[in-house]
Image (cartoon, helix red, strand yellow):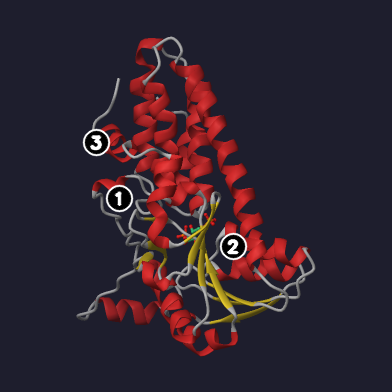
């Protein structure tokens, strides 16, 4: 039986009470750790049990690669251990991965804040802990900066950015998503987060990110994505495709008058709610990673350095069939 608090974390990720690729990864390994600690069965059955936990977590949200990367890190170590040591290894690997996330997060803040100059006006979209932390660090270094951020429909993650940065004393101009092209001209750089980066340098991030990149390119300002190694996809190196999550149309319709929704639903209408989009590498100035600032075409180097060339193949194999 999967412990209640592990199921609660899975549910929180699915319903987006826990959201953002970094937090999703952190909570996924925390769930694996709790699962290992609370296990009461025999050593012989532990690997199958952990495989069930991994499958439950993997089925929460499909797009951010940080989730399978985190789970793979733990599972891969467990598979290569004896039945007797598997439980302790699951717990240690989870703790180790959490530390790796924290260390790489600190590195991207260091690199990212160096890129921001005094008097920069930074354009951002959606809520990324990495972006907020980079901007906050630059501000605390005494740089006089401003931020322009989108609401990020339909779930308004931009309000979190607005609140977090405004509370620190940073001047924020909050705009509707449809005004991206109007205001990007006032910015000196754009910085967004990342959910998945493919081996050939495509960025998958909150839907609308590709509009920001295109508008930044048109306006001639640099477009950066801040991404720890967990955002890079080893599976993409093996030809694995990124699945774009389509969420419930209810998220769009929630702000519509109820009567209007009811009458529209009886007509020939269609409501689609993709959560992410693809930004091509030629519109990305660089990825700010824990290993340094790299052009998108070198994404494969991060995959090789942090996961190894063959890990994508192993991930596919592990996640396709339960292991024992
Ligand atoms: C969040 C989103 C963020 C990335 C990076 O989407 O697209 O830009 O996840 O965030 P959602 P972080 O709200 O649908 O999860 O830097 O926190 O990992």
Classify 10 Å Cα crowding around label 1: few (below 14), some (14-19), many (20 and above).
many
Pinpoint residue 154: horizontal percent, then vertical percent.
45, 71
Q: CA distance from mark 1 to mark 3?
A: 15 Å
Establish whether ligand 1 lies closer than 8 Å to the Cβ of label 2.
yes
Are the residues flagged by discs 1 and 3 in contact, CB closer than 8 Å? no
Up the image or down, 95 lies above or below 276; here it is above
- What crowding class fits label 2: few (fewer than 14 Cα within 10 Å), some (14-19), or many (20 or more)? many
- Identify the disc placed on residue 8: none
Where does the image place residue 284, in percent across and percent down from the top left?
44, 69
Say above or below: 290 vs 218: above
- Quadrant of the drawing holding the N terminus: top left
Give the residue pinned by disc 1: 236
Location of mark 3 (residue): 320
Which image quadrant is residue 137 in?
Answer: bottom right
Q: Residues within 10 Å of mark 3 (few under 14, many from 20)?
A: few
Residue 157 in view: yes
């Amino acid at each position: 039986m999967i412990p209640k608090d592990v199921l609660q974390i899975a549910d929180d990720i699915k319903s987006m009470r826990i959201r953002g690729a970094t937090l999703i990864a952190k909570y996924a390994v925390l769930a694996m750790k709790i699962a290992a600690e609370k296990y009461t069965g025999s050593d012989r059955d532990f690997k199958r049990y952990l495989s069930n936990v991994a499958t439950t977590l993997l089925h929460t949200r499909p797009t951010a690669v940080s989730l399978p990367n985190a789970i793979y890190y733990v599972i891969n170590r467990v598979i290569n251990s004896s039945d007797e040591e598997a439980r302790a290894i699951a717990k240690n690997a989870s703790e180790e991965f959490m530390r790796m996330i924290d260390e790489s997060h600190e590195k991207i803040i260091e690199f990212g804040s160096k890129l921001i100059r005094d008097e920069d006006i930074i354009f951002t979209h959606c809520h990324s802990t990495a972006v907020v932390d980079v901007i906050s660090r630059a501000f605390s270094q005494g740089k006089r900066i401003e931020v322009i951020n989108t609401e990020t429909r339909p779930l308004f993650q931009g309000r979190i950015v607005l609140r977090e940065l405004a509370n620190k004393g940073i001047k924020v101009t909050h705009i509707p998503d449809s005004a991206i092209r109007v205001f990007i001209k006032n910015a000196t750089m754009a910085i967004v987060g990342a959910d998945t980066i493919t081996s050939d340098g495509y960025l998958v991030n909150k839907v609308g990110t590709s509009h920001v990149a295109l508008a930044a390119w048109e306006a001639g300002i640099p477009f950066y994505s801040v991404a720890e190694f967990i955002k890079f996809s080893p599976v993409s190196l093996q030809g694995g495709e990124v699945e774009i999550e389509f969420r419930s149309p209810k998220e769009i319709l929630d702000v519509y008058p109820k009567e209007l929704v009811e009458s529209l639903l009886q007509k020939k209408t269609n409501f689609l709610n993709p959560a992410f989009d693809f930004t091509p590498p030629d519109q990305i100035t660089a990825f700010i990673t824990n290993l340094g600032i790299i052009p998108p075409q070198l994404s494969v180097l991060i995959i090789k350095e942090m996961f190894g060339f063959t890990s994508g193949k192993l991930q596919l194999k592990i996640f396709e069939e339960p292991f024992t």
